[in-house]
Image: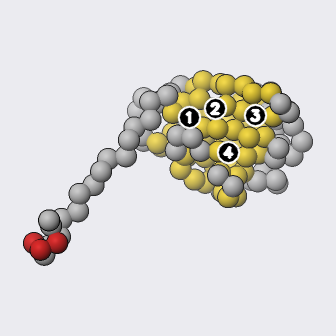
Amino acid sequence: MKARHFYLKTNYADKSVVSYFEQSLVTLGKSSDVQVPINAPNIEDRHCRIEQRESCYVLKDLRSLSGTYLNGARILEAYLYDGDQISLGDISITFHLDNPEKPKEEVLISKNPRWNS
């Protein structure tokens, strides 16, 4: 399975950093050996990770004390979509796909022919 490209725009203390990725697994945290090092209060060494599952990405909290938030809701694991807002303590991160795919429209057909107009 080929990894899709994505990028993260991180905002903290009036700074903005854009990081591009092709990996299928990216870890965020305070440790120096993660792909997205964040040196800020309330951030664990390995705080959360973004992993590719088939053709989509999932954000997973790694048992952090302060939590991982997606679009304002605390999560343990959640699917990521282009433009989603990730919050880790005072850190704001925007998730972007390089080439977001539009969701396929699904046409439902009823067994009752009067409803299929």
- Of 47 and 97, nearer the camera is 97
Residue marked by disc 4? 86
The local secondary structure at tag 3 comes to: strand
Q: What's the distance in space between the residues labelled 4 and 2, CA to CA?
A: 10 Å
Furthest residue toward left: 113
Q: Earlier in the sequence, mark 3 or mark 4?
A: 3
Q: How is the image coloured?
A: secondary structure
Spot occupied by residue 35 in the image (x, y as percentages of width and height):
69, 28
Looking at the picture, which amino acid does disc 2 mark? Leu
- Which residue type carries mark 1? His
Can you give x and y, in whole percent of width and height, for residue 45 in the image?
Answer: 81, 39
* Residues packed near mark 3 inside 10 Å, few (<14), some (14 to 19) or many (20 plus): some
Q: Are marks 2 and 1 in contact (CB under 8 Å)?
A: yes
Q: Which residue is mark 2?
A: 8
Return the residue at label 3. Answer: 11
Q: Residue furthest right?
A: 41
Which of discs 3 and 4 lies nearer the camera? The answer is 3
Point out which mark residue 96 bears.
1
Outermost residue to the front? 117
Cα gap from disc 2 to disc 3, whole angstroms: 10 Å
Q: Does residue 104 appear anywhere in the picture?
A: yes
- Neighbor class of circle 1 (other Cα within 10 Å; few <14, some 14-19, many 20+) is some
Q: Sequence order check: which comes first, mark 4 or mark 1?
A: 4
